Structure formats: C-alpha cells, structure tokens
Image (cartoon, rainbow, N blue to C red):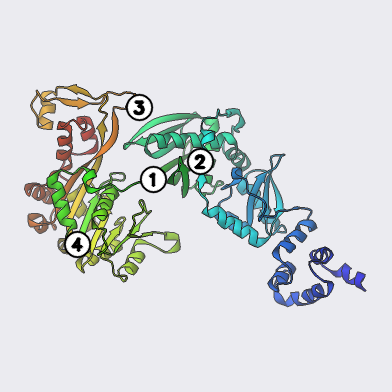
Amino acid sequence: MEAAHHRLWPALGALLVRSGALSAEVLEEAIEAQPGSGMRLGELLVERKLVTRAAVARALAEQHALEFVDLGSTPISPDVAGLLPSSLARRYGAVPVRFLDDGALLVAVSDPTNVVHSDDLRVALGVPIQVGVAAADAVAAAITKADAQEIELDDDLIDDELDDEALLESDGSNVVDLQEAAASAPAIRQVNRVLRLAIDLRASDVHFNPQKSSVRVRARVDGVLRDIQTLPKSMQSAVTSRLKIMGHLDIAERRLPQDGRASIRVGGRSMDLRVAVLPTTHGEKVVLRIAHVSQETLSLAQLGMIPETEAIFMKAISEPFGTIISCGPTGSGKTSTLYAALELLNDDERSIQTVEDPVENQVEGVDQIEVNVKAGLTFPSALRTILRSDPDVLLIGEIRDEETAQIAFRAAMTGHLVLTTLHAHSSASSIARLKDIGIDPAMLATSVNCVVAQRLARKLCTECREAYKPTPAEAAEVGVKRTHTLYRPNGCGACNDTGYTGRVGLFEVMPIEGDVRRLLHGSTEQIAEAAVAQGMLTLRQDGLRLCREGVTSLAEVRRVTSDRLD
C-alpha cells in the first residue's frame, strides 16, 4: 500500500519524505488539502509550517538536478554584486552568486520550475548562467542586503594595465556580449580609473560621449568641460553597460533615455552618482553627476559676498517670515548659498525642515526629506505635511511648478521663513519666471524678501597667473586706467595647465522693496533698472570687481555673466 501511495506522490513530496523532512502521513494530508488551497505543494507545506523553505529548496534542487545554494553561508562574490538590478531580482526571485570556472554565472533562484524566468534572466544578465536553488526567504534577504550595500571602488584596480583585447568588439546588438564585457575586469578597471581621475580633479560631472571611432571622456571641472581620456570604440559597449549596472538601469534597453543613482566610496569619502543615459547616433551617451555626500557646508563668510551685498542678504534672512529665492543655472552654487543661510538660522529656538531632490548635505539639527516621485512623495505633497508639523524655517530644493510655488509663498505669508531655488537668468528675470508659471505679482510683493542671482567663476591660479596691461577697450570695460594691472590664465602643474584653480561666487542681491516692489507687475527691464537705481550690484559688476582685484580674468567674467540687465 505504501508503495502504491509512493507512486502517486508528487516528486517533491517523495523527496521530502525520503530526506526525513516530512512524514508520509503528513504528506498525504497536504496532498488532499492542496486542490482547495490554490497553492502549490511546496507553498502549502511552508504555509502550514510543516517544512522549512530551506527543506523545500533542497528537494527542488535534487528534483531538477541543480545545486542547492545556502545563501546564509555562501558569500556573494563582489564581482557579481549589482549585475542584476534589484527590481529584476525581486521580479524573478533571483540572486547572482559567483562566476564558475567555465565562465558561467551561478544564479540562485527560489523557483527553478519557471522556465520563462530562467530565459529572461539569461537575457537580462547577458552571460551564460547556471541556475541553483535557494530558499525564497534567503533570496529576498540577499536582495535586501544588496540594496543596502554601496558600490566600493577598488583602488587596487586603478593602476592595473587594461587588457583591451579582453573586451568584446561588439556593436551592442548582442545582450550576452554586453553583459559579459561589462562584468569583465578591464571594464570595471576602466570605469574605476575614470571615476578616480574625475574625483581627483574635483569634477562635478563626467561625460562619456560616443564618437564615430572612439569614446570621448570629459569631466566638468570648475564649471568647464575638459577632455580627460579617449577610449577605443571596442570598449564602448562594455563601459556603457558597466555604468548602467552601477546605476541599476536596464542593460538591455538601448533605445530610450534612462536615469539611475549609485553610491560609491573612494578613499574613505562617500559620494552619490546620478547616472543619465541618452541614446545618440553613435551609441549611448552616459553622464555621471558626482555629489559629495559628506562635504562641509560653507559659511556665509566663505561664499565671498562683499559687505554691502552680505548686509542685504542678512537682513532678508533675519526676517521672521518671507521668501529668499536663489536663482541661476544648474551648478551655479544656489543650494550652497541656502545651506549657508541655514547654518546661521539653525539654533535651538527654530524648527527647520527641508524638502530636497536629492539631499545634498546632511545638516545636524535639520529635518531633511528627500523627494521620491515613484513613491508619491513630491514637493507639493511633502510641503503640505510639513506645514502641519509646526516649522519655523522651510528649505524647498527648487520651485518647478505653480503648485509648489503657491504653497511656498502662502507659507511665507502665514509666518514661515522660506528658502528656495529657481532656474532663472538674473534676479529680475526670476520675477518673470514666477509670473509665467502663474504667480500673481501681488503675492510676490507680500511674500518675497529678496532674490539672489549667482554664478561661479573660476579663480586664477596664483602660481602661474600672468600680469598684463589692458587695452583701452578692456580698461573701459573693467573700469580701470590703462596703467592698472590685470591678470590672465597661463597654466602650470599646480592647476593642471588650465590657468585656474577653484571657483569664486558672483552675487546679485535684489531686495523686494521700494520701486522694485511697485514694479513687480512690469517688465524685466523695468525691474532690473529700478534695482540698479536702488544700489544693486549686478552679476557683471561683481565679476568685474573680482577681475580688478586679480581674482579672476576678464575672459572668465565674460563667460559666466551677461552685461544685459535681464
């Protein structure tokens, strides 16, 4: 009778009984209950706590002649960390474990019976895979642990020689080739080398620009892009795939733009990377934005405002309510200025809360919230909740739309001090920008304390700057006599032959008072002229001051400013 029953048992059940994990009587009861449960046998046994997930995984591995992977005691190789984005790992219930001697990638899965998932994994990973079986809860725990780990840049790889021949010369049409190349040591070394060089140069962005016969690598140093390396075309697919893996992006998608994020550590320093991928005619362009997570906040004194400008700014942030707007293009130091203001405002008597995308500096004593659009946490939704939590000071990372602006300015009108940024060309043009998104000038007149426009100009290298006498036109432009000494860049080892090292802020602070307040309904030109008449120093004028003092060059001032009032 037992033999007859044994012939009717599912293979999984028979293996569990043979291993001693389950008795024959209990298995028979489970088999009888299974049709009405809507669950598979293994799921039912685990649900009823009759066997462990590990026991089911061992039996499945034996049933399908696969390796059982105990993720609790089997370390995941650093070489495969991050090869499979967490979203796909959770979808397929799979974790890459290590590369085997034959070059295949061992992948632990919780359900080896799903052939479709196995095929999808081969495509997504792009390398030959060997499936192993692990307990479902162990797979989930491994995925969670991988999400929490940062990508560590291995400094030992930086100085190794690259073996270009080890990379596949692929046109990107074969996903298997892409993933195999991305996982190769040369691809990892090359990405590490570029990142380390960019960080040593204090770059804010790194551009991987595919060309017809090469990949041009440029870094934005002190606001200006400069070439730092040229990669052979044969490395393009491997390097691009490696960068996409770091950013947890879809390696198989090469037709659409993608955005991702990664965390790295170099020399003990933590940094965040924003990864943007754009398809171009010669392949995918990748741009990395480097954010130093733990960098110190600049003080207001370190920003470099002249005393008169600083006094206007200090008066604005000393008000108990109202809005301070910092405007300028991306990378102009807007957020640094607001953080400097927060440093002055941060005391035991105030509740300070921020909404940012992302949180750039972590400030002790300040409640900081990072926007997460996918989770439904947007600027407007976060602000509505914050305003119910009794804040004194709000920092809003950026005003992007009418809804955010309306909430911010109403908060300023109801007793809160609001600090925010805005993309606008100048202080005066910020008013036009706000009116364009639907804000009434009357609301601006009662809720805005001041607008700060700013730029960052490169400072001349003091080791090699070259003195010269200006031409009549230059002297007139700078506002000096022809006998005055100006300086221009030269280039030396100390500044990497650029002639510049570091940057300095240019500021234009426009208080909303007097004629400026009365003209908020008017044109940008009218507002700018009224502000200048009230004593506002324009960005160009502040830059020329620095030029006269030998801090920067006339060419640099021309590059970052305009002599237009708007």
Image check: 546 left or right of 132? Answer: left
Identify residue for label 4.
Answer: 322
Q: Amino acid at mark 3?
A: Asn
State the residue in front, 345 or 338: 345
**Separation of marks 4 and 3 at Cα, in angstroms:** 44 Å
Residue in view at x 40 percent, y 44 percent: 289
- Residue 491, horizontal then vertical, whole percent: 30, 24
Q: Does dot 4 land on a helix, a strand or a loop?
A: strand
**Separation of marks 2 and 3 at Cα, in angstroms:** 24 Å
Residue in view at x 74 percent, y 72 percent: 50
**Residue 373 sits in which quadrant?**
bottom left
Q: Which mark is residue 292?
A: 1
Mark 2 or mark 4: which is in front? 2
Dot 1 alpha-carbon crowd within 10 angstroms: few under 14, some 14 to 19, many 20 or more: some
- Asked if disc 3 and disc 1 are in contact, CB closer than 8 Å, the reply is no
Identify residue for label 2.
Answer: 153
Q: Does dot 2 land on a helix, a strand or a loop?
A: loop
Q: Amino acid at mark 2?
A: Leu
Q: Does dot 1 land on a helix, a strand or a loop?
A: strand
The answer to whether one can see residue 422 in this image is no
**Residue 389 sits in which quadrant?**
bottom left
Q: Amino acid at mark 4?
A: Gly
Residue in view at x 21 percent, y 69 percent: 414
- Asked if disc 2 and disc 3 are in contact, CB closer than 8 Å, the reply is no
- Residue 294, horizontal then vertical, whole percent: 38, 48
> Which of pointers 4 and 1 lies earlier in the amino acid sequence?
1
